[in-house]
Amino acid sequence: MADGKLTALKVKALLKEGAHQSGRHTDGGGMHLHIREDGRGAWVLRFRLHDRQRDLTLGSPLGDEGARVTLQEARNAAATARAHIRAGRDPIRERQREAQEATEAGSRDRSFLAAMESTLASRDGVWRNEKHRWQWRQTLEKRAIPVLGKLPVSEVAVDDVLRVLRPIWAKTPETATRLRGRMEAVLDHARALGWRAGENPARWKGNLSELLPNPSKLARVERQPALPWSKVPAFVAALRERRGMAALALEFCILTAARSGEVRGATWSEIDAEAAIWTVQATRMKAGEMHRVPLSDAATAVLLKLRPDKPRADGLIFPSSRNTLLSDMALTMLVRGMALDNLEEGELPRWRDLTGRAVVPHGFRSSFRDWCGETRPEGREVAERALAHVVRGVEAAYARSDLLERRRPMMQAWGEFCVSVQTEGRDATKLLLDQEVVA
């Protein structure tokens, strides 16, 4: 049995060894990863209630997407179960009661609305986060329920699905595509419950694909305004004249080519200072896959400026003034202010893309990608890995490495390029290390 809390990397290693690591690997608070002698694993919460020890299974870390339960999702489910225990309730009986109530409700109400509620309830404990749960409910309640809510789920047909999708299919293809997928999930769930039979009318391939235009051909990609890569060093120099946590977070975003959410949620436990690597766990990544970032000297300098003497492992690297997650709007407003403040009427933004639009934080990822394509020898695959873009198709079956060491010189060169402009006669890295941080 392992000591200390588990990490996503440790779980991956344990599961890879399978039967050789059979036993219970604790995560604390009664939760553990139980690897059986056949190599299969399950998350288990061991608890004691009314002088009786029980085991509650929280799901498996193996399996297909949707069925697989990550370490963070298991922790969330364990936290819910512990809340029941503190209230004197047996979480196993609570789960049985909820399932029974859902079954009884289903026997009385088998509408699309009831199927939606049952679908959402069945996913409790496996959502990536609360926002993900809210997005599912909000999309369905806003678009599908007004049309299908009272309809018996067994009677939902292709025409009904089209009545929901057609009004928004051409206007907002991305939203419509997500809505279609969520409707398909509800109808699949209803079929699994025995509430309906036959083909799923929300299925795309060979069904709606014959009745609706392909969303990829409808969607006009609205690219984020991005600064031409040649102007990034001047922007970074101007950014270093700004004080505050948002400025340092934005600089770290630029130097690592990371998304703002990944940076704002970064904790000290994710930083391996000795190896100069920042590891972002899968639960925090858009693609749901762990991402390692080799840290350049310039990126490390930002961390050195912020690192306390004894950082808490779960402590945010870029906290707000209230020691909470820094708002994404803080970065947006910072860039907007740098681009638009004190302009004369009719003047173009100071920091703008080639069409004259004011740049936004996310656009610096595009600046980085253009720099890679025009100046670096590493090639497309390495640059795409640096941006944590998902490899799809046949290529994905063979692309097992994250090309970390091939990315390292590229990120070092990017960091050196970004801080290459002198400010007030001093090197920009020195300016950063000398300035005070005002949260």
Image (cartoon, rainbow, N blue to C red):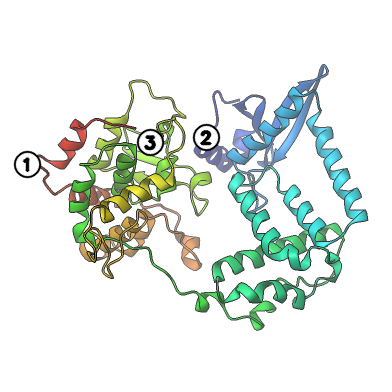
For disc 3, the marked residue is 318
Q: Position of residue 248 (x, y in %)?
A: 30, 40
Task: Count the numbered circles shown.
Answer: 3
Query: Which residue type does callout 2 highlight?
Result: Thr
Judged left or right of residue 288, residue 168 is: right
Determine the image quadrant of residue 362.
Answer: bottom left
N-term-proximal mark, 3 vs 2:
2
Judged left or right of residue 116, residue 75 is: left
The residue closer to the viewer here, 226 or 391, is: 226
Query: Which residue type does callout 1 highlight?
Result: Gly
For disc 2, the marked residue is 7
Label 3: element kind: loop
Q: Position of residue 424 (x, y in %)?
A: 9, 42
Alpha-carbon span between mark 1 and mark 3 = 28 Å
Q: Position of residue 428 (x, y in %)?
A: 16, 42
Q: Position of residue 191 (x, y in %)?
A: 82, 63
> For the residues carrying marks 2 and 1, which lies nearer the camera in this image?
1
N-term-proximal mark, 1 vs 3:
3
Vertical relation: 213 (above or below) 386: below
Residue name at image x 54 percent, y 41 percent: 12
Classify mark 2: residues with Cα within 10 Å, few (<14), some (14-19) or many (20+): few
Label 2: element kind: loop
Label 1: element kind: loop
In the rendered image, the quadrant that contains the N terminus is top right
For disc 1, the marked residue is 425
Alpha-carbon span between mark 3 and mark 2 = 22 Å
**Residues at marks 2 and 1 touching, judged by CB atoms closer than 8 Å:** no
Alpha-carbon span between mark 2 and mark 1 = 45 Å
Residue name at image x 81 percent, y 33 percent: 92
